[in-house]
Amino acid sequence: MTVAQVAVSDDHAANREMVRDAFATAERARADLLVLPEYASGFQPHGVEPEHAEPLDGPFARLLRERAAASGVAVVAGTTLPGTDARAVNAVVAVDGTGDLVGVYRKVHLYDAFGHRESERLEAGPANAPPLVLDVAGLRFGVLTCYDLRFPESSRRLVDAGAQVLVYPAAWAAGELKAWHWRSLAVARAIENTAAVVAVGQAGKGVTGRSLVVGPDGVVGLELDEAPDVRTVDVDGALLAQVRETNPSLANRRYAVVPRD
């Protein structure tokens, strides 16, 4: 799996070149999956506006499908889609190694916190939408994004859908304690779900970077700093099975997760 902690601009054409480069790196490393951050199609540090929205048949999603089909590398990437009103939708698309669009996750928890008001520009996805999972190389990856990391119910719902690896593309806003929250929450989601966590942040102005890959035992196997970087790592399915056997907390739990109306 290739983790692409890239800097994203408001220049969509330049961002597509960045995506091509990331695919090339993943292909050279013989990765099965490429993970790009939230808003990989276009980003503004003060807030992504609806004019950045592209449809699923637009140039960004087409490029993901074309490069996946050509390279055999599946991809999970954040983008912005047109909404049903004057706002847009913060979304993550999942494409398999044949270039087929497996699904789209529309961000449920909008970032109305720490002085930000994402809901002024974006509309939330439905909380009761089917969980987005992607099967790659014998593992099942569940897809969420950014602020969802603060809501453990969302990750547990993906685990109920069979997810063994939780993927969080993000543009995690910088600020006091924010990098510490990002790391702590990623480790917590791994431990409580006995699942690997792949948290891929944007690099650049106003965001935290610091992408990390956490094992199901809570051990951080990869951790980047704030600079752009692209790294390839293995996710150990055998370790995941061993951890779940030793710590059967999923089998022992007494509550289910049900979306609110």
Image: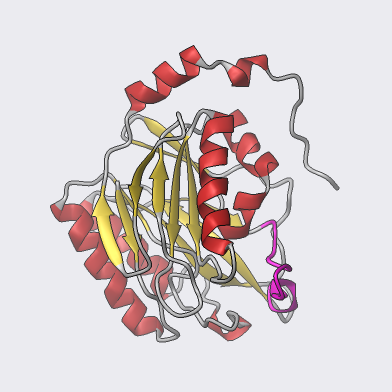
- On whether residue 165 falls in the magenta region, the answer is no
Most frequent secondary structure within the magenta stretch: loop
Q: Which residue shows up at 36% across the image and 47% down it? A: 96
Residue 95 locus on image (x, y percent): 40, 52
Residue 3 locus on image (x, y percent): 33, 54
Query: Quadrant of residue 116 in the image?
Result: bottom right
Q: Is residue 200 above or below residue 251?
A: below
Residue 255 locus on image (x, y percent): 76, 24
Q: Which residue shows up at 35% across the image and 26% down it? A: 237
Query: Quadrant of residue 243 in the image?
Result: top left
Residue 8 appears in the picture as rendered: yes
Q: In this view, which residue lies farthest toward the left?
A: 28
- Position of residue 251 in the picture relative to residue 44 (left or right): right
Residue 65 locus on image (x, y percent): 35, 60
**Nearer the observer, 247 or 93:** 247
Query: Quadrant of residue 209 in the image?
Result: bottom left
**Nearer the observer, 92 or 151:** 151
**Nearer the observer, 140 or 82:** 140
Q: How is the image coloured?
A: secondary structure
Q: In this view, which residue lies farthest toward the right?
A: 261
Residue 145 appears in the picture as rendered: no
Q: Which residue shows up at 45% across the image and 29% down it? A: 217
Q: Which residues are magenta?
A: 108-122
